[in-house]
Image (tube, coloured by chain):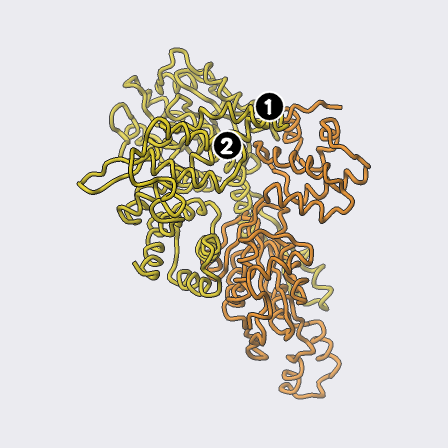
Amino acid sequence: MSLLDTHIGFMEALRSAGLSVSLAEGLDAISALEKVHWHDRETVRAAYAATLVKRQPQRVTFDAVFDIYYPRLIGSGVAGEDAVPGEGVRDSGPELDRFREALAEALAAGDRQALQDLAVEAVARFGAMPGRGPGLSSWSAYTSLQRVSPSELMDRLVQGLLAGGLDEAQAQRAAGRRVGDFTRMVEGDARRRIAEEKGPEHVADVTVRPTIDRLDFTAARRSDLDEMRREIYPLARRLAARLTKEQHAQRRGPLDVRRTVRASIATGGVPLTTHHKPKRPHRTDLVVLCDVSGSVASFAQFTLLLVYALREAFGGVRAFTFVDDVVEVSDRFRPGADVVEVMEGLAASISHAALWGRTNYGRALTRFAEDHPDAIGPRSSLLVLGDARSNYSDLALPVLADLAGRARHAWWLNPEHPRHWGTGDSAADRYGEVVPMTECRNLAQLGEFVHKIV
Amino acid sequence: MTSTWFESAADATARLRGVGYLTDEATALTAFLAGALEKPLLVEGPAGVGKTELAKAVARATGAELVRLQCYEGLDEARALYEWNYKKQLLRIQASRGDDSWSETHDDIFTEEFLLTRPLLSAIRRDTPTVLLVDEVDKTDVEVEGLLLEVLSDFQVTIPELGTVTATRRPFVVLTSNASRELSEAVKRRCLFLHLDYPDAERERAIVTSQVPGLDDKVAAQLVDVVVRLRELELKKAPSIAESVDWARTLIALEIGDLDEATVARTLGVVLKHASDQQRAIKELKLAVG
């Protein structure tokens, strides 16, 4: 494959991974590469990044695709060929012991280069799998990590670091970080080898994850959820900035005669600039009713956090959580409260929201209408969050219709893909007839929706 | 042409270091490319990691003059590009008292004398090396972005009464953004992009010691260690380099030679600006409140 082919393939892969890379930017990248030396892979990476990646969240995706198209080395590399002689068994007991010893040393020293070499060796030695056809082979990061199991070395590593003068918590953190790094290196190396066998296009399609703001709430892993939570405040800040700007643009009210005349004195009585009275922005009272049962809990938490982060844009916000009973959680969100504490408080309140622990929308809606009749009024808007999966129980459609009728606006946010609506025990289609239902699967969609309702 | 700015990435690193700005490789390379390709450089990142400082450092390192356009909401063409000094024009018309014919007056009042140049135009008209810093470009309205687009892609400005002004020497343009708003694709496409993030512990220590002379090496190491740990916490505003430097200055002013837990707890207000962040830090780092 020529250099140009690789470049074109790389552009294509970036586009299919969701980065909007234009032809002009591709040309920029080439002229940037002409100016730098090719001896260092990181230089090439930085030159590509400067010209192609225009949004920081996309950097992770970019790096993954770059590693596939411009691999660090081919096969086992120079170092690998020394370490893995052609004859004999690659994967044997003594070899494993020797390898783990080397790994423990490298981890203790925190030597990135050594770790990288070991990751290559780990995949070569322990991760080889027979391929689909004769003469083909494949590689598995999972198998290599199972054999090597770096997490078992954690304790030893922590002990070593403690002896080195770090305190307990610091040692734990450092050890966790190094083992995590090694795991990622092994995964990256397995990807690289598979790409070598099957061609980079194949791997880029399969293994590259979407950026964090396009990642589905329901498909998120624990670490993704943490990362998403960190994104909430920046997102709220961006939304708030956009809102003030838009309100500012519409704020030109009627002419303020007094100020205009006053200003015209400076220009000899000619009113060169006119002044206007500001318009008062309308603020809605928002009532949020969220399903916090296991399947959709994280989605509800994100939405609540975002709504509360934008509290100033609303007249007032009241939040209720339910599984099969309703609890008000408005007081958990004090101004300036700590995010982590709020999340803990919310998690605790889930136990109050469940009598039997099975989601029952009908019962929750009825209880809400009975216990908080004053919550919904002509000035307030109702926002329901949930997947509308009610375990085949009564749906209490009239109650919801009555609530929606009393409120100024009503919306329903559903974290499921529309193609799942109305399947199984989902009552999304039936509730959707009463209250307009919107799909909201990731942070980007959530941000758009919240912006729309403000 | 490349000699105006930097020869290579290594040259950029060395010269920026020479004026007290410690970069990492990616930053130096991108700065070099911005000069070599004559493309604007869009720098994004959290507040206080040295985005504005990068532009200033480039200006110092290359001996160029810095022209700064501070963006804010409501910034318009008249304050970014150029404006006719209409008060002076009015005076001129009144002073002539109708002695001149209209065409004479007209030719007379639209000349250089009555033109007020604003940062964008002055950066283009200068014939000595210039660094144009467009600060906090995300604060402006979309219309100004359109204006920037014209200026940044062709480096020329058309003034109806005077004609087109084209840059004799392209300035080194740095745009900074706090990402409070997504810039339009068109602006991003024309720029090189650089995301400045918190530095690693090694570089941060170097920055703090170079910015705050007289700081004990041991204290610097302790300080950077605490700051790194603070950044791992879930805070509303993680401390940035500017805050680390402020903290170091505070410690010098208080003549503290050892950063123990009680001192950290007492001076936490320098690095964390939210009450809830401070409480969280005290809890997570298990600080004794002294």
Is A130 left, or right, of B60 in this rendering?
Answer: left
Q: Which chain is yellow?
A: A
Q: Which chain is orange?
A: B
- The CA distance from mark 2 to mark 1 is 20 Å
Label 2 residue SS:
helix
Q: Earlier in the sequence, mark 2 or mark 1?
A: 2
Residue B8 coordinates in the image, percent (x, y): 55, 63
The circle on residue A105 is 2
Q: Which residue is mark 1?
A: A168
Identified by mark 2, the residue type is: Glu
Whether residue A31 is visible here, answered yes or no, is yes
Whether residue A253 is visible here, answered yes or no, is no
Residue A428 coordinates in the image, percent (x, y): 30, 29
Identified by mark 1, the residue type is: Glu
The circle on residue A19 is none
Residue A117 coordinates in the image, percent (x, y): 43, 41
**What is the chain identity of the residue bearing mark 1?**
A
| Picture quarter with the N terminus of chain B | bottom right
Instruction: Depth check: give the residue in front, A434 or B115.
Output: B115
Count of marks overlaid on the render: 2
In the rendered structure, are the residues bearing label 2 and label 1 in contact, judged by CB atoms less than 8 Å apart? no
Q: Residue at x 57, y 71 (%)?
A: B170
Is A173 left, or right, of B252 in this rendering?
Answer: left
Label 1 residue SS:
helix
Task: In the rendered view, tell whether residue A229 sits above or below residue A350.
Answer: below
